[in-house]
Amino acid sequence: MNDRTEQMDDLQLVALPSAVGCTEMFVRFSLTEWALRPMREAASEVARAMAEAVVAAADPAGPGMMIARVRLSGGDLIMEIESPREVRAPAAPPGGHTGVVDLGAGRCLLWASLPLPGGMEASAVPLPRRQRRPSQAAAIEAAREPVDTDPDVMQRILYGLASRHDRHQR
């Protein structure tokens, strides 16, 4: 079994009640993006319970920041929340595990893990491509459009750049 983290995403939030829904949506979005839709319900419920525990422990006058994190490691989906205050771990989800790690200075890390479906390993999860490239339709459209440069427009741009450069050298 390989316990290397294959994919991770995190979100920093203020530990206020709105963070609960944001954490739940963040987990749902991440699992949708990672093609793990069958896990969305169970994982978002676990993430909601963890976020509720963190928000309940926060001081409303100075709630602090919390970090919600999801990652794929080995055969598990791991959800973590860094809390600005000490918090007890919620009940373990069916088939999963939970725990709390003391980070010092009153901070702690809540975590919960759920097994990936069908004994899948994290390295087998199809991850999204993160390349900036135009869609096929946009590339075809760009190829059709002739690139004409108006000499007057280019002259104005060059004049403006030269004027700005002269002002900065004085």
Image: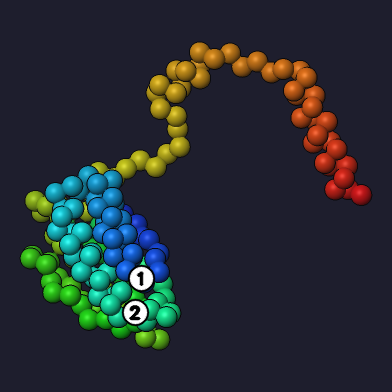
Q: Which mark is residue 143?
A: none
Where does the N terminus fall, quadrant-wise? bottom left
What amino acid is at disc 1?
A: Leu
Query: Front-most of 58 and 169?
Result: 58
Residue 99 coordinates in the image, percent (x, y): 20, 76
Determine the secondary structure under disc 2: loop
Q: Can residue 95 be seen in this view?
A: yes
Is 31 situated above or below 73?
above
Q: Which of disc 2 and disc 1 is earlier in sequence? A: 1
Residue 15 versus residue 159: which sits nearer the camera? Answer: 15
Position in image of residue 106 (x %, y %): 37, 86
**Above or below — where is 124 with respect to 105?**
above
Q: Quadrant of residue 80?
A: bottom left
Up the image or down, 121 lies above or below 69; here it is above
Considering every residue shown, the one lying at the far right of the view is 170
At 82% from the left and 41% from the top, the residue drawn is: 164
Residue density around tag 1, few if under 14, some if 14–19, many if 20 or more, within 10 Å: many
Residue 9 picture quarter = bottom left
Identify the residue shown where x is 37% and y is 81%. Answer: 59
Measuring 20% from the left and 69% from the top, which residue is drawn there?
Answer: 49
Question: At 32% across and 69% down in the image, what residue appears?
Answer: 17
Q: Can residue 107 be seen in the rendering of this structure?
A: no
Residue bearing the label numbered 1: 16
Residue neighbourhood size for the residue with mark 2, other residues' Cα within 10 Å, grouped as few (<14), some (14–19), many (≥20): many
Asked if marks 1 and 2 touch (Cβ < 8 Å), the reply is yes
59 vs 107, nearest the viewer: 59
Label 1 secondary element: loop
Where residue 58 is drawn, which disc sits there? Answer: 2
